Amino acid sequence: MLKLFYFPGTVSLASHITLEEAGADYEAIRVDFLSAEQTKPEYLAINPKGRVPSLITEKGILTETPAILLYIAQRYPDAKLAPLDDIYELAQMQSFNNYLCSTLHVAHAHKQRGSRWADEESSFEDMKRKVPETVGNCYRLIEHEMFKGPWVMGEAYSTADAYLFNVSRWLEGDTLDIKNFPKIEAHRARMLERPAVQRVMPLHQR
């Protein structure tokens, strides 16, 4: 059985939704960030990065959302969560997912995780002020250039949709109005109608 380590409000929601969409046999284990459980030796033995998600498989442990999402899609091909028969389309999906991971998520993290990049308190405040601009630029690129519709990749649902839904839930916290991104707003509403999302969401309420 797979084991997914997660915490509400984090990027682990995408992996949780994808496991549910796949019909996987898995156990979801909540890591208590409120008591800093992610920094304790027991969890660091699972993921030395001290972050979620982490996915325990029969062969070992996977971390990083793009890797976990692709693993689930390939392990459960009948769920059709990725264009596995088209290497170009698959690369396009991975390009989107990696953009969320390497650019959008990092821009968002500058709001509360400034100590990863600087030491001065004034630098932290400057980073926070910049977040609406940098994160907004990411969403404008997605809205106008990257999102095909009605799903991220076009007509077919994929892991990219779970990932976009996950990070788009941070929009309001970054002081951005989702109504300025109508495609992303419609995508969020469409995702909330999916049974897999409805089953997972109660576990991701703080």
Image (cartoon, helix red, strand yellow):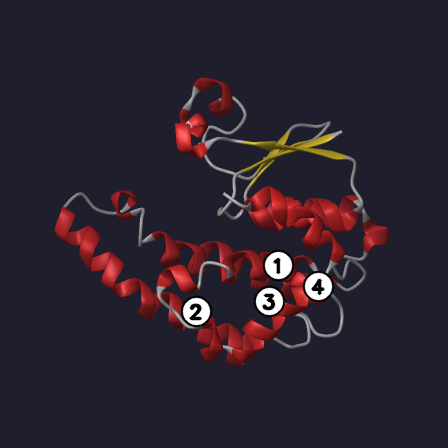
Question: For this rendering, which residue is in front, 171 or 57?
Answer: 171
Q: Is disc 1 surrounded by few (<14), some (14 to 19) or many (20+) residues within 10 Å?
A: some
Q: CA distance from mark 3 to mark 2?
A: 17 Å
Q: Secondary structure at mark 1?
A: helix
Give the labeled residue for mark 3.
188
The residue at the point 50 percent across, 19 percent down is 42
Give the labeled residue for mark 1.
94
Q: Is disc 4 surrounded by few (<14), some (14 to 19) or many (20+) residues within 10 Å?
A: few
Label 3 or label 1, whichever lies nearer to me, is: 3
Label 2 or label 4, whichever comes before in sequence order: 2
Q: Amino acid at mark 4?
A: Glu
The residue at the point 80 percent across, 57 percent down is 80
Q: Quadrant of residue 30?
A: top right
The quadrant of the image that shows the N terminus is top right
Give the labeled residue for mark 4.
193
Q: Is disc 2 surrounded by few (<14), some (14 to 19) or many (20+) residues within 10 Å?
A: some
Residue 136 horizontal/vertical position (percent): 39, 71
Question: For this rendering, which residue is in front, 83 or 200?
Answer: 200
Q: CA distance from mark 4 to mark 1?
A: 24 Å
Label 3 or label 2, whichever comes before in sequence order: 2
Residue 89 horizontal/vertical position (percent): 70, 67
Q: Which mark is residue 138?
A: 2
